[in-house]
Amino acid sequence: MKVRAIQITEHGGPDVMHLADIEVGEPGPGQVRVRHHACGINYVDTYFRSGLYPAPLPLVPGTEAAGVVEAVGAGVTRLAVGDRVTYAAMGPGSYSEARVLDAGPVVRLPDSIDFERAAAMTLKGMTVQYLLKRTWPSLRTGDAILWHAAAGGVGLIACQWASALGYVVIATAGSAEKCKLALDHGAAHAIDYHREDVVARVKQLTGGRGVAVAFDAVGKDTFERSLDSTRALGLVAVFGNASGAVPPFDVLGLMRRGSLFVTRPTLGTHLAAGAAQEMADDLFAMVSAGKVRIDPPRTYPLADAARAHRELEAGKTTGAGILVV
């Protein structure tokens, strides 16, 4: 069957994306077909569009959506036709009216959460889940953590969730308004990186010690700050490349800063291990309990995906954005 989708035939900026009619077939063994109601917009989508993350062309961007299962392939028993679902997939393809994908990352959605909120929070919330709950198990109540880009979709969920776990969240953002947003979502402190020295401020806030973990989705522009803000035997977790990939660095610098650890985790690793429903249920429980609130997302028609990417990459956005199908 034919569905409308955003497609790219070459890598580049937002304008390489265009609306097209594409063929979507029947699910094979271990697969499902999901009819989308809303599609999440995430920074990782720009990496596939630009070619930073390689994938065969032509390509439909997007890794997150919410909707209804309309067909299941052989061997799929966990999901059924008619199930309300959401997913953060391990590959692109969600900027479309429907898609076929492996059933592994597709999770059942509680009736209390609508499709728009689900598409705004699934990938972002599950990212926060693995970062806070699975990446550095030695984190303890009262530990200080640094979170860059805290006014974005992931950051606003992280500020709330980390605060609920008892961590002291030091947020960074690019304006006074964005800093206030992070504070309103649970951050204990917020640093405007355009006006303040991030490292000096972190050291001041932590009595000169530094944070237990620096969570860094920005990459190239903030990596050195993250290293210099982290206490001895602490961790720098680089989970994104908003400013570009982190360049090669001197590993001896980790020794000089106090035997630091550095990791480049990804949600896909945890999804591949079969943890999707468990991680999603943890997220849904936090939302249902009111410990994490999901603000109404920015909405764009499917055909306006290029505009959504331009605004995202220009740093003009806060919170989450979705494409409405």
Image: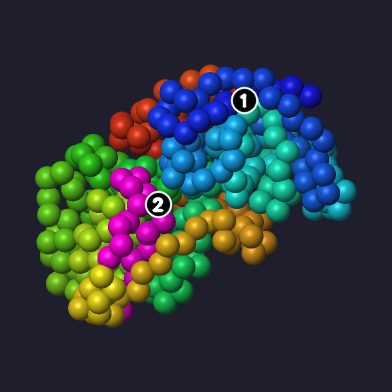
The x and y percentages for residue 203 are: 15, 66
Examine the rendered structure and indicate whether residue 18 appears above or below residue 167.
Answer: above
Q: Which residue is mark 1?
A: 5
Mark 2 surroundings: few (<14), some (14-19) or many (≥20) residues within 10 A: many
When asked about the image quadrant of residue 84, the answer is top right
Name the residue located 23 percent from the left edge and 73 percent from the top edge: 253
Q: Residue at x 54, y 28 (%)?
A: 8
Residue type at mark 2? Gly
Q: Is residue 95 above or below residue 195?
A: above
- Residue at point 64%, 42% (across, down): 86
Question: Closest to the observer: 246 or 105?
Answer: 246
Question: Residue 251's x, y, as percent?
Answer: 29, 73
In which quadrant of the rendered image does the C terminus lie? top right
Residue 212, position in %: x, y?
31, 71
Residue at mark 2 to residue at mark 1: CA–CA distance: 26 Å
Nearest to N terminus: mark 2 or mark 1: 1
Residue 153 quadrant: top left
Residue 150 shows in the view: no
Q: Which residue is mark 2?
A: 240
Instruction: Say left or right for 61 vs 255.
Output: right
Magenta stretch bounds:
232-249
Instruction: Name the residue type under label 1.
Output: Ala
Question: Looking at the rendered structure, which numbered label has been put on residue 65?
Answer: none
Q: Please tell me how crowded label 1 is: few (under 14), some (14-19), or many (20+) other residues with Cα within 10 Å.
A: many
Q: Quadrant of residue 189?
A: bottom left
- Which residue appears at 70% of the width and 35% of the height? 99
